[in-house]
Image (spheres, coloured by chain):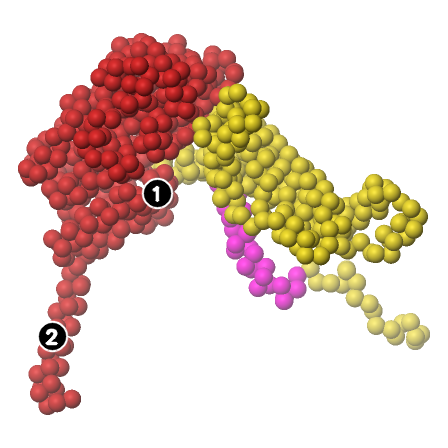
Chain colours: A yellow, B red
Amino acid sequence: MTASAAAPVPRTAAATPWLDTMTMPAAMVLALVVGYPVVYTLMLSVQDYNLLAATPAHFVGAQNYRRLLDDSTFWQSLGHTAEYTFGSVGIAAVLGLGLALLTEPITGPHARVVRALLLMPWAVPFVVVAFLFRYMYLQNGGAINALLLWSGVIREPIAWLNASSLAMPAVIIANVWAMTPFFFLLMTAALAGIPAEVLESARIDRARTWSLIVDIKLPFLRNALLVSSLLMIIANFNDFAKIWAMTQGGPGYSTTTLVIYVYRQAFETFAFGYASAIGVVWLALLLVFALVYLRALRMQH
Amino acid sequence: MSRFMKRNGLPALVLVAAISTAHAADKVTITFANWATAEGTTRPAIEKVIADFEKAHPDIAIKSESISFSEIARQLALRVRAGNPPDVAQLAGNDTFVLAATGKLEPLDTYVDAGLKSSLKPESTRDLAYQGKLVALPWTLAPAGFWYDKLVMQKAGLDPAKPPKTIDELMSDMAAIRKSQPDVIPLALDTTNRPFALQSNWPWMATFGAAPLGGANARADSPQFKAYLSWMRDLASKRYIDPGRKIGEFRPLAAQDKVAFIWDQVLLQGVIQNAGKMSDADFYKRWGVTTQPAGPSGKSYSFEGGHQLVMFADSQHKKAAWTFIAYLASSPDAIREYTLGPGSSLPPLTKLASKDVASKLDTPIYSAFTERIAATAATPPYGPAFAAAASAIMAGVQQAVTGTEPIDQIASSIQQQLERK
């Protein structure tokens, strides 16, 4: 027998059992709190189930999904979801990054005050943010119109939340205000993590500020930016409270996102079968983002 | 413990405890889901009514469950399906029929005795039947009226004794108000997207001869409905309305004379008086109410926004639940405290047992509602279809009010959505 033959076989991925008994309790809890609603939603999505109907739910196959294809409101909602999510996350990420870079040179007690002020919107509950902006946007008596009228920028007050073309940008601005501190916080932390010797050597090489940001800092921030953006995309895809409190999806359908549409179908018309079908499509889209997020996390490590 | 206590006190205590237990066993608890206790204006009044009821009926306890007006139908529908409904609930408008559609409301025909039946105003129960059975007892009546601020009218050079009688007069009055007082909202209309807003706008559609729902000829792409949508767009483009506000959000503005005309129920009086600490006499000098200005149909309409009481079929204490329902709707104390209280509305009774209650109703506002406005109420085709259609119709109304899409396109889009539902 050779020495190599006598050596213990290393534990490989193939040898790892696919289900560790130690994970069983957690797996059972997950199956109950996550698995059950998902499976039940899938089951409801292929049924004609109205909460008010006297007749019991019955299997209708892909009928609810076929109805989705012809439902212009569903497609509008899908488009608005993308507009709201990517618009908000994109702008907030750029602003958060910009603020982190701008405040980086500030040191001492001033830095703490500035950072605390910039982080304040993150501490405001989302529903409060929504109502705050709703009242600021009011056509009659709103602070924004009052300021613009006073400064002579406009002659007539603007119906920010009640004009189909302005409602979505107005809601996105409120969302960006609430979300930017999250990106600012993460980017500030990521900037602090850049090795000092890297920055020092760049300075010795007389790198200009712009070059320092673009060639040195941004590559270091890329992963943090990607992961935080994906996290916020998932969170905004599900955002109900802000939009509902500000516009309830209106005027018309101009701010109706998937989550608002599901809510109206489920709790105003009580069409749980159809609402579940929309929910399944929504879940599938979220899963795609979640998978990309997990992949990004692995890349980061 | 003394010998006396051992000999006499202990058996006495045991006896008292036994009697108390037996008494507690006889006492039934009724769960009452309502928004009256959820709203600051009406909470003290309804809590007093409940306390008075419990005092008069020591064998019945009331467990009040506060649920907001906009949430109550949703929560009750879910509770009905979960097999956990309350015994009694306060409902209004389409919500009553949404719950009736579940088949879980107890028909009340057999509970309403001849005495109560003869004392109820016939119109109060006329539209509360579902599939031929009375599913709710009217608690309060609250039709919508056309309120006008006399001070604002005066400032605009209008005669406050002559509120507009037609849509044309209304448009001309609003133009004068807009010109003289740019910070005043000429007309307060609820254009939010919810079933209540459709209920509130239904009379305005009706006065244009439009009915987007109910009946074979009901269509959202009819010339009448398009005329209504065009009028709404005209109102918004001239800034006569402030879209997106719930009717409740206009009331504080009305109290500050920032609204000229408001389409609202009788409770507006209480809100304005409370906000401005205004006496009855001052209020009548400042505000008046009349029927809706008539549109092309030549008729004025209103909607009945009163509240009803329902009993759930699964209730284990139906007799006690009915006693409570009948007390709320017809007892002079309940009418004095709650119906005519801060959330003021009209009692559904023809004759009032108490003189002081009758005298409370002898005001210009109550008289206008009772004698002129109530008769114009037209009930929309309530039911689950109404709830499902409300979202599509009000979204269309909002598109007309806030967008630039052609009215024909909006009307046909609403019609298509209604046909799909």
Q: Report the span colored magenta.
A: A19-47
Residue lying at the far bottom in this picture: please name it.
Answer: B3
Pick the front one: B63 or B250: B250
Residue B163 seen from this side:
yes
Q: Residue B395: x, y in percent?
A: 45, 25
Q: Main secondary structure of the magenta part?
A: helix
Circle 1 Cα neighbour tier, 10 Å, few/some/many (<14 / 14–19 / ≥20): some
Instruction: Give the residue displayed 46% in from the left and 18% down from the top.
Output: B400
Residue B23 part of the magenta segment: no
Camera-near label (2 vs 1) is 1
**Which residue is identified by label 2?**
B15
Residue A291 seen from this side:
no
Q: Residue A288: x, y in percent?
A: 66, 41
Chain ID at mark 1: B
Q: Which mark is residue A259?
A: none
Q: Give the SS element for disc 1.
A: loop
What kind of residue is marked 2? Answer: Leu
What kind of residue is marked 1? Answer: Ser
CA gap between label 2 and label 1 equals: 45 Å
Q: Residue B381: x, y in percent?
A: 30, 24
Q: State the quadrant of the N terminus of chain B.
A: bottom left
**Which residue is identified by label 1?**
B68
